[in-house]
Image: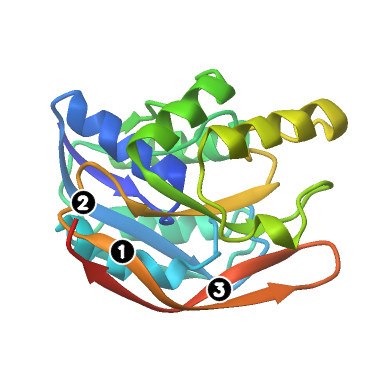
Amino acid sequence: MKLAALISGGKDSMFSIQRALEAGHEVTHLVTIIPDNMDSYMFHSANIHLTGVVSRACGIPLVTETSSGEKEKELSDLKRALSHVEVDGVIAGAIESGYQESRVRNICDELGLKLYAPLWHNEPESLVREMAVCMDIRMVKVAALGLDESWLGRRFDDRLIDDLLALHKKYRIHIAGEGGEYETLVLDAPFFKKRIELVEVERVWLGDHGMLRVVKAKLGEK
């Protein structure tokens, strides 16, 4: 199928593209919804401004649409963005969020598109370990017990995942961050033609949560 991928720049959307390409599909567009509301129910906002850099890194054109980020109302913004692309289906990176999966599916049904969600109900630990092997993933936002400022900027590897497992046992956080515990940024993936290099970052810490805001990034050779 010709597919449009919903992306935030994080691990789930990027790995879903990788799975789609491995399955023989063609990813013709990236689609990003930029919410005004940092606490949007549907759309991640941490470093969302970098999706243009992601588009250039992988050579896939980007379609963007702004959104109020208001619950339910933001769905019409997604529908409007998808109406601009001629594709057979839509890639979504949902793993366990029934709220996101059901709403994207409903929009696809209304537009006559197929929903392709290759990560849906995958076992979280093995999935995140698989992601970490083939992609350069960085932790850029944390908002859960046990995730302090020292986690910002860490690269996903076996040690980080083991640390997440320890926090899962202690605080029941979701290994893949499906409960909003953390957000990520992918700097390189197999389908990237260039890798993303962070030139300037800013740590923003607000007592019990915070983010690594990318001020400047560039593309580099792989």
Instruction: Please tell me which residue is depicted at 19% across the width and 36% down the height of the picture.
Output: 88
Residue at figure coordinates x 59%, y 65% from the top left: 69
Q: Mark 3 highlights which residue?
A: 213
Residue placed most toward the observer, 17 or 104? 17
Report helix, strand or loop for mark 1: strand
**Residue 159 picture location, percent across and down:** 59, 36
3D distance between C-alphas at marks 3 and 2: 22 Å
Q: Label 2, on which residue? A: 192
Compared to 22, does 16 lie above or below?
Answer: below
Q: Is residue 17 left or right of residue 199?
A: left
Q: Could you tell me which quadrant the C terminus lies in? A: bottom left
Q: Residue at x 45, y 48 (%)?
A: 137
Q: Earlier in the sequence, mark 1 or mark 3?
A: 1
Q: Amino acid at mark 3?
A: Arg
* Residue 129 locus on image (x, y percent): 48, 28
Would you place residue 219 above or below residue 164 in this image? below
Residue 215: x %, y % from top left: 47, 81
**Amino acid type of disc 1?**
Ile
- Residue contact at pointers 1 and 2, CB within 8 angstroms: yes
Confirm whether residue 112 shows in the render.
no
At label 1, counting other C-alpha atoms closer than 10 Å, the crowd grade (few under 14, some 14-19, many 20 or more) is: many
Q: CA distance from mark 1 to mark 2?
A: 9 Å
Q: Which mark is residue 196?
A: 1
Q: Quadrant of the N terminus?
A: top left
Q: Residue furthest front?
A: 159
Pick the residue in front: 183 or 41.
Answer: 183
Amino acid beneath label 2: Phe
